[in-house]
Amino acid sequence: MDRVFITGASSGLGRALAQQYAARGATLGLLGRREDALRELAGSLPGAHRCYAVDVRDRPALHAAAQDFIAFCQGRVDVVVASAGISAGTLTDHGEDYDVFKAIVDTNLLATVATFEPFIASMRAAGSGRLVGIASVAGVRGLPGAGAYSASKSAVVTYCESLRLELAAQGIQVVTIAPGYIKTAMTAHNPYSMPFLMEADAFAKRAQAAISRGASYTVIPWQMGVVAKLMRLLPNAVYDRLARNAPRKPRKAV
């Protein structure tokens, strides 16, 4: 029976992953900002689970929750998924967007680091475990009006790659999942078409399979993986012509 700790569990991808793992008999540590949503989720799942109403940007509180779950699992946690993430349009020439930019980077990147930190020692002692970072196809190339989100998700990919190399000899696997467009509250208000839009439960099933086999990097759905590879291969001049007038995510306070 897996013991799985998931951030961002109160909604979106984190909630879908929690449902997927619980259906397979896992014991879960569910962390999110909204206690009512976490309690409702835990009550709907088979098994006994721990809930932690914590903002992932609060590193001491996040670490305290992790330590509590490690103790609850008698020192051994099998999978940690850093799923918490936020998104909004940002423009560097609008000074008021700086705080939004910082919130996105703190939540999407630095909180991933803070999520993994407390679990490494016990995984090292066990000689096994999987740390899972949730990136995004939006991190493959910079998107106009999404500097914070694209940068943070690109950084998750390279951070997880560094960590994968650091921990490989200790038996700890690092898995990066890069979603394309998944039907969640985060994507519900995007003012543009979303190719290969996937239901969250279908995403979670494929993500769980990739985590289980220890895949180093997986794009879900696979069609967006093809798109991502093509985007990466385009010369800058061609990419710039195609993308500079792409539709933009609305700016807002986070």
Image (cartoon, rainbow, N blue to C red):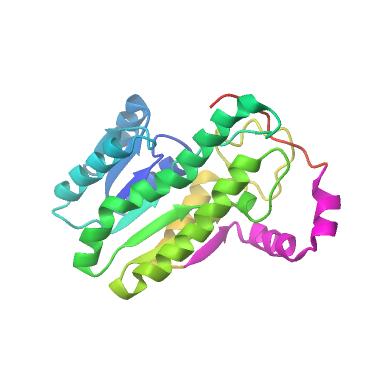
Q: Is residue 88 left or right of residue 120?
A: right
Where residue 230 sits in the image (x, y, percent)?
74, 64
- Is 157 or 98 nearer to us in this picture? 98
Residue shown at 64% from the left, 46% from the top: 197
Whether residue 129 is visible, yes or no, is: yes
Q: Is residue 132 left or right of residue 172?
A: right
- Is 106 or 49 nearer to us in this picture? 106
Query: Dominant secondary structure of the magenta stretch?
Result: helix
Where residue 31 sits in the image (x, y, percent)?
33, 38
Q: Is residue 34 left or right of residue 215?
A: left
**109 over 2 or under it: above or below:** above
Task: Determine which quarter of the picture holds residue 43.
Answer: top left
Q: Is residue 124 left or right of residue 17?
A: left
- Quarter containing the N terminus: bottom left
Where residue 229 sits in the image (x, y, percent)?
69, 64
Whether residue 20 is visible, yes or no, is: no
Residue shown at 47% from the left, 57% from the top: 207
On whether residue 254 falls in the magenta region, the answer is no
User: Magenta region: which residues?
Assistant: 216-244
Task: Determine which quarter of the picture holds residue 209.
Answer: bottom left
Where residue 57 sits in the image (x, y, percent)?
39, 36
Number of numbered labels in the structure image: 0
Task: Determine which quarter of the picture holds residue 175.
Answer: bottom left
Residue shown at 46% from the left, 39% from the top: 107
**37 over 140 or under it: above or below:** above
Residue shown at 53% from the left, 27% from the top: 254
- Is 22 or 66 nearer to us in this picture? 66
